[in-house]
Image (tube, rainbow, N blue to C red):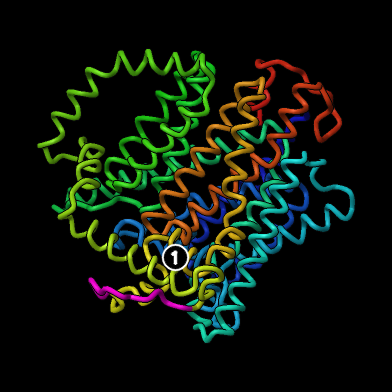
Amino acid sequence: MSRPRIDDLALPLVLVALTVFAAWVLPATLMVLVLPLLLFAAVWSAWRSFRTGVGAVLFLALLADNPQSRPMEGQWESPLYPAGELLYTNLHLLIGIEAFRFSLLEVLVLGFVLIALMKRSAGGGAGTLSKGGKTLAAALGIAFIAVIVLEGWGLVRGGDFRQSLWQIRQILWLPALAWLCIHAFRRRGDIWFLSGIIMIAGVLRAFTGFAYYAMSRADGHFPTYVTSHSDSVLWLVGVATCLLYLMERPSQRAWILCAAYIPVASLAMLLNERRLAFVCLGAAFLVVLFVVRTQVLRRLRRTALIASPVLIVYIFAGWNIDHRVFAPVRTFQSLLDESDASNHSRHVENFNLVYTLLESPLVGHGFGHPYSEHIETYRIDHVFEQYLYMPHNSVLWMLAAGGIIGFLALWAFIPLVIWLAAKCYRNAVAPTERVAALTSISVVVAYLIQAWGDIGAHSWMVTLILAAYVGIVGNLDRHVHARQFHTPDVDGAPRKNSDAMDVAEGVAC
């Protein structure tokens, strides 16, 4: 496998640093003038090295504060906030042209799609996908078409076009982003390349959260969260990668990685205090147990047996103590508490969504329509105009909007990703490939839980992370097959069936 050249990696990293710095320092009027230059640099970077261009934009998108997610409770604009404003805010608000009701991120994604198509037509696109990868790419295409069809179906039935744009934004771009990542992250070393992006972004976002927490406590304020809701998935993926790497390849390097990252991410999750973060972590762990090899399962059982006394004491101590350090225990308590107002409102919302689904169970109402509020709890349209168009439960909402047929078309790729990842895990030789497969399953589980409990399908961060790992899975089947039969990599170089070479290449990438 060929290693990336230094100049391929330097340009996107410099681009990210310059974007964050320029957005932080320059006034908005000058930033508008710099915008075309940054756009050109991103496209040029992707044309020279598609992998590093897409990786740079992904890193910037994960690193920057998305203003729509109200980071830091809306009380503090970190140095990462202006870059997020530049990337996520609709351009008509930045440059004053009403027709430009889309963000810079969407422009970049569309530009990258065009570059990928041009590279493919010129014979420089992705290597041949496996049968499973081709099936996954086809499922992504079906999902993209399904969004467009349901948009048209909803408008024909009198839907609100403006509200539909809020509904379909991330859902429409998800299959396109995943297709891009399939073409960008083609090599085995890209597994570590993506893991590095996730972990570095997670650490930097954690430290911005720590800074906000320290400033808030100094002012006598106790923050309810320190970054944003979606950051939980970012930290979860990093923690899962570290633990799975340790589980699959116990080594000094794995222990150092865990010791360096997990405490930072764990503290960030505790201070952020999103109960879905701990639900995602626990659910991902349980799902992974059904997939891992017998040898690893025995190792996990021994670890659980040794840790069980500490875990029992932790649960008993945290059951009646209200402190952030016992946030996972409080999460479990709150899920069982039927008197909790949040739980009650979610139950009512789910009932209303099921009621809406039964009104048109096969084809749904399409996008642009609110769900039927058969039972009313709290009206929050004065603070969130789209609350009937974008409910907390994105899963039931997509069922209601698309019906059974539309929902299957929208989400057919989800079980396919899990199946492909599980298959690759069973057949993989290298620990890196097994870690990538299990991490991908964990990401899908986290996405499903976020979509069920907290508008996860409309989160850019969750969408970007899922798309990236769908891209990894789309190529993983080919990597595993090549490992077994010693076939060449996408660049024509013969593969070496060596775990040491696998790790060395990953670190170099």
Q: Residue at x 36, y 54 (%)?
A: 453
Q: Residue at x 31, y 15 (%)?
A: 305
The residue labelled by disc 1 is 397
The number of numbered badges drawn on the structure is: 1
As drawn, which residue projects farthest toward the bottom? Answer: 158
Quarter of the image for residue 249 reads: top right
Q: Which corner quadrant holds the C terminus? A: top right
Helix, strand or loop for the magenta stretch, by majority: loop
Residue 392 rendering spot, x and y as whole percentages: 37, 62
65 w.r.t. 89: above or below: above
Residue 421 rendering spot, x and y as whole percentages: 61, 35
What segment is highlighted magenta in the picture?
369-379
Judge from the rendering whether residue 334 lies leftward or rightward of residue 496; answer left or right.
left
Residue 215 rendering spot, x and y as whole percentages: 24, 50
Judge from the rendering whether residue 215 lies leftward or rightward of residue 20; answer left or right.
left
Quarter of the image for residue 98 reads: bottom right
Residue 327 rendering spot, x and y as whole percentages: 23, 40
Q: Residue at x 51, y 54 (%)?
A: 20
Query: The residue tagged with tag 1: helix, strand or loop?
Result: helix
Q: Nearer the viewer, residue 114 or 429?
A: 429
Q: Taking the image as drawn, is residue 197 in sight?
A: yes
